[in-house]
Amino acid sequence: MKNCEFQTLDEFFEFYNNYAFEAGFSVRRSLREQSRDGTEIVRQELCCHKEGHSKKLKAQPKRRKGIIRKGCLAKVTVVKRSGVYVVSQFIEGHNHPLTSPPRVHLLKSHRGISHATRCLTMELRVVNIPTHQQISLLEVQSRGIENMGCMGKDIYNYERDKRNELKGHVGDMLYAHFLSQQENPFFTFKIEEDETTEEFDKKWKKVVESSNLSDNGWLQSIYDIRASWVPAYCNHIFSTGMSSSQCAESCHSFFKKFQIIKDDEYQSVYLVKKRSDQIQKDREIVYDKVQEVDYLPQQYILNRWTKAAKSAAVKDLGGLEITDTNALVVKRSKLFHHASLLIDKVLTSPDEGSTIFIEALDNVFNKLKEMQVDKGESACVRKKPSDVFQHRYNEPNQVRAKGCGKRLKKGKGRKRER
């Protein structure tokens, strides 16, 4: 790798990150130096994600985390010479075990939502497809979650960030959309503004004084707790439209089924009551606090229990992937994966890239059309199966199920028919 040349730092990072993916570690940008005028970077260093040492925290964290940094010295450095970046230092060895291939896609530098995936999730959101179904679709199209390029959590975080960007601007966007529809003579709209606390106080005072009820104790007590029932005071609290305590009884009936009968430093025991018809069943749920088991070790989790069991690739005893080259789903997944990578490059390129991409697709389409014409219609139409079959196996004896409507005849009845 030493003395390799790269035109840009992005090209250098992509090359080393691909190498890290095959080797089984993650990449992190480390030290860099700028030119004297500060206009460009003349030296860049990429290191292993376990480089350095973790800081010791004084307070114990709420969530226990493993040791991320272990002082790994693996790194690569480039310096700018004659307009290109040249590798000046390359340290290959690691002081920690490398990640196995089935888990390397979980590392940070190998996770990222491509522009094509972002556009696809936005389109699926427009037609109200839930996020978990979007993730399942991406898993199938990429032939497994390890080929998605990101995790389901990354999709959720991306949509959360998009919602945060629009927070506070939804009203303005809706108002701008209404204004754009004013050209339609059949479209009208009306905006009702929420009442403020000052307006409510003024109206309350006006009604009370006009009714001569200023000395009414009950009205005064209701006014004192206005923060719990006046919409102008509690609009900042999300209550799904509920303004009373009528729906609280269903919640109370749910929690009443659980009763704590023991709670000490070793165990918590809950008594669960369940009524079925006229029989009451009691069950006890015991939570052991001594073992301190926060998660199930990976070696105890079978692959068929995971969400990726149906979409992951099937491998033989030698570790080679078993695929059906004639299956349309497999072909489509491979083509979609390559097309997604290409579309992602086009989206980040200038407008000329889109023109070149469309022209190339038109040329491919015309070539495929010529291939189909040369091959003839026989390649597109399946042959009809022959009407004559050579039977190799006899049909199994028909067995009538219970409740079929006709009584099964015994042996004597069968002999009489003969």
Image: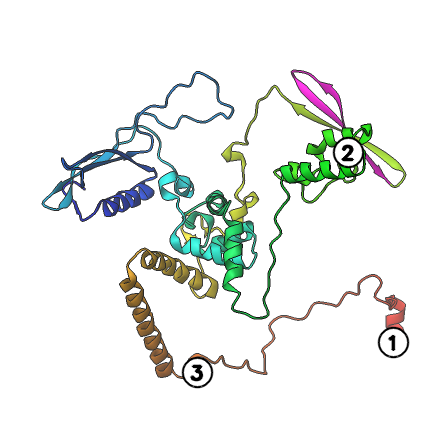
Q: Secondary structure at mark 2?
A: helix
**Residue 118 coordinates in the image, percent (x, y):** 43, 53
The residue that mark 2 highlights is 252
**Residue 163 coordinates in the image, percent (x, y):** 50, 46
The residue that mark 1 highlights is 417
- Density class for disc 3 (Cα within 10 Å; few <14, some 14-19, many ≥20) is few
* Count of marks, rendered view: 3
CA–CA distance in space, label 2 to label 1: 69 Å
The residue that mark 3 highlights is 378
Q: Nearer the viewer, mark 2 or mark 1?
A: 2
The one nearer the camera, 181 or 415, is 181
Image height check: is 19 above or below 376? Answer: above
Amino acid type for the residue under numbered disc 1:
Glu
The one nearer the camera, 105 or 236, is 236
- 257 is within the stretch colored magenta: yes
Q: Is residue 220 left or right of residue 72?
A: right
Q: Residue at x 53, y 48 (%)?
A: 309
**Residue 232 coordinates in the image, percent (x, y):** 65, 39
Question: Magenta residues?
Answer: 253-276
- Quarter of the figure that contains the N terminus: top left
Secondary structure of the magenta portion, mostly? strand
- Density class for disc 1 (Cα within 10 Å; few <14, some 14-19, many ≥20) is few
Amino acid type for the residue under numbered disc 2:
His
Disc on the earlier residue, 2 or 3:
2
Q: Nearer the viewer, mark 1 or mark 3?
A: 3
The one nearer the camera, 365 or 405, is 365
Q: Residue at x 80, y 28 (%)?
A: 215
- 368 is within the stretch colored magenta: no
Tell me if residue 322 can be seen: no
Q: Secondary structure at mark 1?
A: helix
Amino acid type for the residue under numbered disc 3:
Ser
